[in-house]
Image (cartoon, helix red, strand yellow):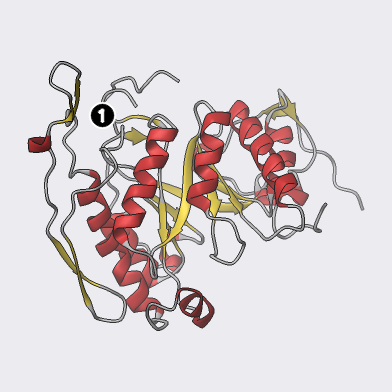
């Protein structure tokens, strides 16, 4: 029996869409498709575009986000960044660069890696348990933030008369000490080699799937994505005015989820799925079912002043750098 089509009603864009980066036979074609998806999702009103990075695709999400920056105008680019085998200093410079490239439209999603394959790929330390790896995430986030802040907002003076580009008195040593996922101490002295990000502090997104990720999110996240009901996911943190909580859904669940799309992150399988989702969202009205093939469960188919983003807008009400 065929279900009756649902009544047509206005489309409201989800807060975020996550597109996983995957190995491709034709990387250039996949990147072109991803760029088009980003533009269409932006036009449909999506606030955040999350780029998934499992460390195995051959793509680096932070680099891809930087490539998408000049192709987009308003959407916030949030690459996942594996931190377990990375240097916090390099993460800080890469994400700060992304914020400059996008003129204050960057976020980041630090993730932990626990597989032996990821450990062998880098060869710097052995694989860690989920608990130890996710316990390191807030430590790394704190170190990265300290490096972002090692340049004062007015450190760049560009004084042609004296030949000074930077006021060295406005750069500060970080002197950070932390413990990594295998219990070893690391230190950072700084300052960063990249000027302070236009936002000052990039919003941090963490997906909660269990107690380990819930603890990391409680300590470090500005945007929390719940893969399940809060209790089932281990998330019981008190609401906070400066924290956004989103519910993760597959695209075909959008019509039946009973959730406000402004409180949803939509998971799609790939850039092609994102294009189908954008087409559905871009319609003035919708009828029938949600775009089932846009999700992983479907059949596969071919700068300015210092501001902080909250829900895609500057938190302090200031205008960002003109784009």
Q: Where is mark 1, residue-wise?
A: 306
Q: Where in the figure is residue 64, as x and y percent of width and height? A: 55, 46
Q: Nearer the viewer, residue 157 or 175?
A: 157
Q: Where in the figure is residue 109, as x and y percent of width and height? A: 42, 53
The residue furthest right is: 1
Q: Is residue 171 above or below residue 122?
A: above
Q: Is residue 167 above or below residue 114?
A: above
Would you call the spot at circle 1 few (<14 residues within 10 Å), some (14-19), or many (20 or more)?
A: many
- Which image quarter: residue 91? bottom left
The residue furthest left is: 169
Q: Is residue 198 above or below residue 111?
A: above
Quadrant of the image containing the C terminus = top left
Q: Residue at x 68, y 35 (%)?
A: 36
Q: Where in the figure is residue 289, as x and y percent of width and height? A: 77, 43
Q: Where in the figure is residue 239, as x and y percent of width and height? A: 30, 49
Residue 49 visible in image = no
Q: Is residue 220 above or below residue 151?
A: below
Residue 323 falls left or right of residue 163: right
């Amino acid at each position: 029996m065929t279900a009756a089509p649902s009544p047509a009603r206005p489309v409201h864009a989800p807060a975020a869409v996550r597109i996983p980066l995957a190995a491709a036979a034709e990387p250039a074609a996949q990147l072109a498709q991803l760029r088009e998806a980003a533009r269409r999702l932006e036009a449909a009103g999506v606030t955040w575009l999350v780029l998934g990075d499992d460390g195995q695709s051959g793509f680096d999400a932070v680099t891809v986000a930087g490539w998408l920056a000049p192709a987009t105008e308003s959407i916030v680019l949030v690459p996942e960044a594996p931190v377990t085998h990375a240097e916090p200093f390099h993460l800080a410079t890469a994400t700060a660069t992304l914020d400059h490239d996008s003129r204050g439209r960057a976020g980041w999603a630090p993730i932990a890696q626990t597989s032996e394959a990821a450990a062998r790929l880098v060869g710097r330390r052995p694989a860690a348990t989920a608990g130890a790896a996710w316990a390191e995430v807030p430590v790394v986030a704190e170190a990265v933030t300290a490096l972002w802040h090692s340049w004062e907002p007015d450190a760049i003076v560009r004084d042609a008369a004296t030949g000074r580009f930077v006021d060295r008195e406005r750069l500060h040593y970080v002197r950070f000490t932390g413990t990594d996922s295998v219990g070893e101490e690391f230190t950072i002295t700084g300052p960063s080699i990249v000027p302070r990000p236009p936002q000052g502090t990039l919003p941090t997104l963490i997906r909660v799937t269990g107690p380990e990720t819930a603890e990391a999110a409680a300590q470090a996240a500005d945007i929390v994505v719940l893969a399940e009901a809060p209790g089932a996911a281990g998330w019981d943190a008190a609401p906070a005015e400066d924290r956004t909580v989103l519910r993760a859904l597959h695209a075909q669940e959008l019509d039946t989820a009973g959730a406000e799309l402004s409180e949803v992150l939509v998971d799609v399988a790939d850039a092609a799925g994102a294009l189908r989702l954008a087409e559905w969202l871009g319609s003035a009205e919708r009828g029938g079912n949600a775009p089932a093939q846009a999700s992983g469960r479907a059949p596969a188919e071919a700068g300015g002043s210092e501001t902080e983003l909250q829900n895609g807008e500057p938190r302090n009400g200031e205008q960002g750098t003109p784009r």
